[in-house]
Amino acid sequence: KDVILPLEQLMVEKEGYLQKAKIADGGKKLRKNWSTSWIVLSSRKIEFYKESKQQAVSNVKTGHKPESVDLCGAHIEWAKEKSSRKNVFQITTASGNEFLLQSDIDFIILDWFHAIKNAIDRLPKD
Ligand code: I3P
């Protein structure tokens, strides 16, 4: 049986490794726990994989799902005060999930910030 995917889901805009900490779920604060995540940005969502890219690809084949974040109505902002680490920004979703993303390498975090901000700005707000 054929699986038909919306075109936008096929359009990966950026992917790579960042440090990630989810700090709220549906508005409820979570204990901060940084870990490396393989991150895939497409036009209206970000997917967070706990594993390496290779592992993520094989897990997709077996139906294992990454954490998916809807960018419609989301906000992005630098979050210097939320961490002792450098180069941290926060994504807050319309559903009240909050994620911190971080890299020690300045150009990497700047590229990600602008790519995600551009994606959010292109989307309808609701
Ligand atoms: C947290 C851990 C995080 C740290 C956080 C600590 O401790 O050290 O790395 O965040 O600081 O509470 P634990 O592992 O015991 O939960 P940063 O690395 O971002 O500073 P915070 O509570 O000030 O956010």
Image (spheres, rainbow, N blue to C red):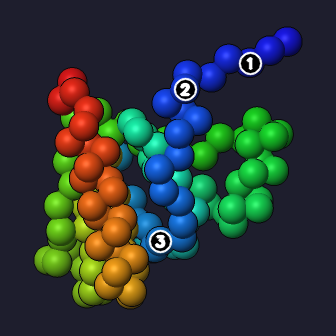
Q: Is residue 95 above or below residue 75?
A: above
Left or right: residue 72 versus residue 13 is: left
How many neighbours does mark 2 have within 10 angstroms: few (below 14), some (14-19), or many (20 or more)? few
Pointer 3: what residue?
18
Q: Amino acid under label 2? A: Leu
| Amino acid marked by disc 1 | Val
Is residue 80 left or right of 42 when viewed as pictured? Answer: left
Earlier residue among tags 1 and 3: 1
Q: Is residue 67 above or below residue 109?
A: above
Q: Disc 2 versus disc 3: distance between alpha carbons?
A: 26 Å
Residue for point 27% across, 61% down: 114
Screen quadrant of the C terminus: top left
In front here: 115 or 66?
115
Q: Residues within 10 Å of mark 1 (few under 14, many from 20)?
A: few
Q: Secondary structure beneath disc 2? A: helix
Tell us which disc is closer to us: 1 or 2.
2
For label 2, the residue is 7
